């Protein structure tokens, strides 16, 4: 398409900035704007997305426009209940006023820092994290995305143990940069980029006996891992909850062999499962805790790798051994501080447990009503999955639900499984409304296809 004159580019930036400042549009403006967004995706973002996101497109091209609490409104003015929650990002709800105000206060002082001097917010949030996380987690390295928090965790484990191998679990999802992708256990994502980190090994999720044998062999051959990396509940794989002895068992193996335990709570953390962290269900403290998504306060991207002193000690001598210029900037950390304030002051982990129980009871009724369609459902707190008889039927239900004002989505790895991960602020009334929409949507698919 070629380069344009800077005058033309300048004009387009002015147009783009005008639209950002706009809350409403005339019908003509709207139609032009939507057609333009399609053009831009087709030609400059990725045409694949226009096809891939079809289910969430509904009968007309919907564009998220204004969001608030547990809902968002599209450009056409239609309101949706958000039961996807940005795949575990919107725990505090959209635009929580307290968090937005905290970020605005920081924005008016200093959004990004020099990256040279001491930053107050970084210290404040690191201390809050040390106080709110289990065990002796003490030092935090801040980044911007979940995959970066896992990258950092892997490096801290390698540094502190002097070892270079890692163990994770079949169907795990830890991100898509090279290090974390090495432990993301799905051929579709790994295949085109092989070979990845050497020395990654995988055990079946939940199988403690297999894990013990694997580690015994690793010791025997002189390849003990630096870390065992796990999701307390596998999210992208379809909300897989392990047996109760699994996570305490990983802790014991790590203690026995001097292996770092890395809990990847990018999706399960910040109250999602009904406790502040999913490892809290087992009273287990990891050596390294990876956080992302919701720690942003649902306002400014932020991620964090919270480590024990032992796990982090390799960074003391040369604090720039691992670094990122803008990760953990003052805006992002002001959002993170607001996030933890809101989670605690509004008791959101508890609300996640209550609303989760409400959802599970409603889904059980839907299973009884449409047994051939909704095969089962499972979850903990507000991390819930509905399992349909096949991927096509799940897709049809998502499509029908979207047209009725409910946003849901499949999992990255398992298309049959549809996740429910709303803001933890979701009201009792909106859970009922979401269940009614699901009922209507399943009814349409059931009558049509069964
Ligand atoms: C458990 C887990 N770890 C890591 C990641 C990667 O996070 P991000 O997409 O922010 O890089 C995800 C994303 O879904 C995740 O669910």
Image (cartoon, rainbow, N blue to C red):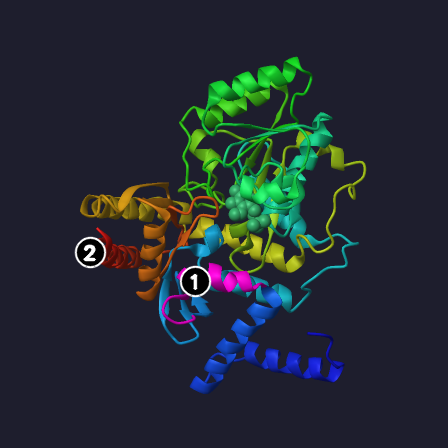
Q: Residue furthest top?
A: 220
Q: Which mark is residue 107?
A: none
Which residue matches tag 2?
447
**In the visual, does 87 lie left or right of 10?**
left
- Residue 9 against residue 325 in the figure, above or below: below
Q: Which residue is drawn at the image coordinates 64% and 37% (left, top)?
A: 153
Res. 95 in view: no
Query: Residue 230 location in percent, x, y?
Result: 53, 33
> Where 423 sits versus 310, above or below?
below
Left or right: where does residue 362 sit relative to residue 274?
Answer: left
- Quadrant placement of the N terminus: bottom right
Q: Is the residue marked by circle 1 packed among few (<14), some (14-19), or many (20+) residues within 10 Å? A: some
Q: Are marks 2 and 1 in contact (CB under 8 Å)?
A: no
Q: Is residue 48 above or below residue 288?
A: below
The residue range painted magenta reads 46-61
Q: Position of residue 151 (x, y in %)?
A: 66, 41
Q: Under tag 2, what secondary structure?
A: helix
Chief secondary structure of the magenta span? Answer: helix
Q: Position of residue 139 (x, y in %)?
A: 66, 39
Give whichever of discs 2 and 1 has the lower sequence position: 1
SS of the residue at dot 1? helix
Label 2 Cα neighbours within 10 Å, binned few <14 / some 14-19 / many ≥20: few
Q: Could you tell me if residue 238 is visible in this image?
A: yes
User: Is residue 438 rendered to the left or right of residue 104?
Assistant: left
Residue name at image x 44 percent, y 75 percent: 75
Q: Residue at x 75, y 82 (%)?
A: 5
Q: Which residue is mark 1?
A: 54
Residue 141 lies in the magenta stretch: no
Of residues 188 and 62, which is closer to you in this image?
Answer: 188
Q: Which is more toward the observer, 25 or 269?
A: 25
Which quadrant would residue 290 be assigned to in this image?
top right
């Amino acid at each position: 398409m070629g380069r344009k004159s800077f005058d033309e580019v300048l004009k387009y930036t002015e147009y783009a900035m005008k639209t950002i400042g706009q809350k409403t549009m005339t019908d003509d403006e709207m139609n032009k704007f939507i057609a333009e967004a399609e053009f831009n995706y087709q030609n400059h973002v990725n045409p694949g997305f226009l096809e891939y996101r079809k289910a969430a497109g509904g009968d007309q091209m919907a564009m998220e426009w204004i969001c608030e609490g547990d809902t968002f409104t599209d450009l056409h003015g239609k309101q949706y209940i958000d039961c996807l929650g940005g795949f575990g990002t919107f725990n505090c709800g959209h635009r929580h006023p307290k968090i937005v105000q905290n970020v605005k206060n920081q924005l008016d002082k200093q959004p990004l820092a020099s990256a040279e001097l001491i930053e107050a917010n970084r210290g404040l949030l690191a201390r809050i994290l040390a106080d709110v996380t289990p065990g002796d987690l003490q030092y935090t390295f801040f980044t911007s995305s979940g995959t970066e928090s896992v990258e950092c965790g892997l490096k801290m484990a390698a540094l502190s143990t002097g070892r270079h191998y890692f163990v994770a679990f079949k169907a795990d999802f830890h991100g898509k940069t090279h290090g974390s992708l090495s432990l993301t256990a799905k051929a579709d994502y790994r295949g085109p980029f092989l070979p990845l980190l050497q020395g990654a090994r995988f055990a079946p999720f939940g199988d403690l006996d297999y894990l013990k044998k694997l580690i015994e062999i690793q010791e025997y051959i002189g390849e003990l891992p630096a870390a065992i990396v796990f999701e307390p509940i596998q999210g992208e794989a379809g909300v897989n909850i392990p047996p109760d002895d699994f996570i305490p068992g990983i802790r014991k193996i790590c203690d026995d062999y001097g292996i770092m335990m890395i809990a990847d709570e990018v999706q399960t953390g910040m109250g999602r499962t009904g406790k502040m962290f999913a490892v809290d269900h087992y009273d287990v403290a990891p050596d390294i805790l990876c956080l992302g998504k919701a720690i942003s306060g649902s306002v400014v991207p932020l991620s964090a790798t919270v480590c024990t002193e032992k796990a982090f000690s390799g960074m003391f001598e040369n604090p720039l051994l691992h670094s990122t210029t803008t990760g953990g900037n003052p805006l992002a950390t002001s959002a993170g501080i607001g996030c933890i304030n809101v989670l605690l002051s509004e008791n959101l982990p508890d609300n996640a447990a209550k609303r989760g129980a409400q959802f599970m009871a409603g889904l059980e009724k839907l299973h009884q009503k449409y047994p051939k369609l909704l095969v089962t459902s499972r979850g903990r707190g507000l991390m819930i999955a509905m399992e349909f008889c096949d991927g096509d039927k799940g897709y049809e239900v998502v499509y029908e639900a979207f047209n009725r004002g409910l946003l849901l989505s499949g999992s990255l790895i398992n298309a049959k499984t549809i996740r429910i991960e709303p803001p933890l602020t979701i009201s009792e009334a909106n859970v009922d409304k979401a269940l009614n929409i699901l009922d209507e949507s399943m009814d349409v698919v059931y009558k049509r296809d069964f």
